[in-house]
Amino acid sequence: NTWFDRIVPCGIRDAGVTSLSNELGREITIEEVLPVAEKHLRDILENAELAPRVIERPAGQSAGRATEEPVEQPAGQPVGQPKAAAAAPA
């Protein structure tokens, strides 16, 4: 896990990172974890309440807009992308 030594989890400087293999004392494979992760992700996504995200900009930072009102951003849409780009077919 030496590459992970540079990670500061949640900004907590005295906390480290680990792996499932380290914690369980045996090798854990992707094939073993994938079905569990997929099940929980499916449960979360199927029951999620989808709502637009409101991005509030500090006064004076209008990002090229004439007004400084909060901007609704569709969930899952990268910040700064125009709404029309989200609706365009791929």
Image: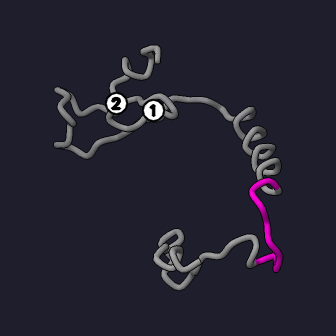
Quarter of the rendering containing residue 33: bottom right
Colouring style: one colour
Q: Are marks 2 and 1 in contact (CB under 8 Å)?
A: yes
Question: Measured from the top left, where is residue 85 in percent x and y?
Answer: 37, 21
Quarter of the rendering containing residue 70: top left
Question: Measured from the top left, where is residue 56 in percent x and y?
Answer: 34, 40
Tell which of 59 and 49 is nearer to you.
Answer: 49
Residue 36: mark: none
Question: Measured from the top left, where is residue 32 in percent x and y?
Answer: 83, 56
Q: Which residue is mark 2?
A: 81
Q: From which residue to which does the magenta span run?
A: 23-31
Which residue is at 51% across, 79% downward?
A: 5
**Residue 27 is covered by the magenta coloring:** yes
Q: Quadrant of the N terminus?
A: bottom right
Q: Is residue 80 left or right of residue 42?
A: left
**Within 10 angstroms of label 2, few (less than 14), some, or many (20 or more) residues?**
few
**Within 10 angstroms of label 1, few (less than 14), some, or many (20 or more) residues?**
some
Which residue type does callout 1 highlight? Gln
Q: Is residue 67 left or right of residue 51?
A: left
Which residue is at 47% across, 28% downward?
A: 74
Instruction: Indicate the secondary structure of the residue bearing disc 1.
Output: loop
Which residue is at 42% across, 30% downward?
A: 73
Quarter of the rendering containing residue 65: top left
Which residue type does callout 2 highlight? Gln
Which residue is at 45% across, 32% downward?
A: 77
Q: Which residue is mark 1?
A: 77
Q: Is residue 47 left or right of residue 81?
A: right
Q: CA distance from mark 2 to mark 1?
A: 7 Å
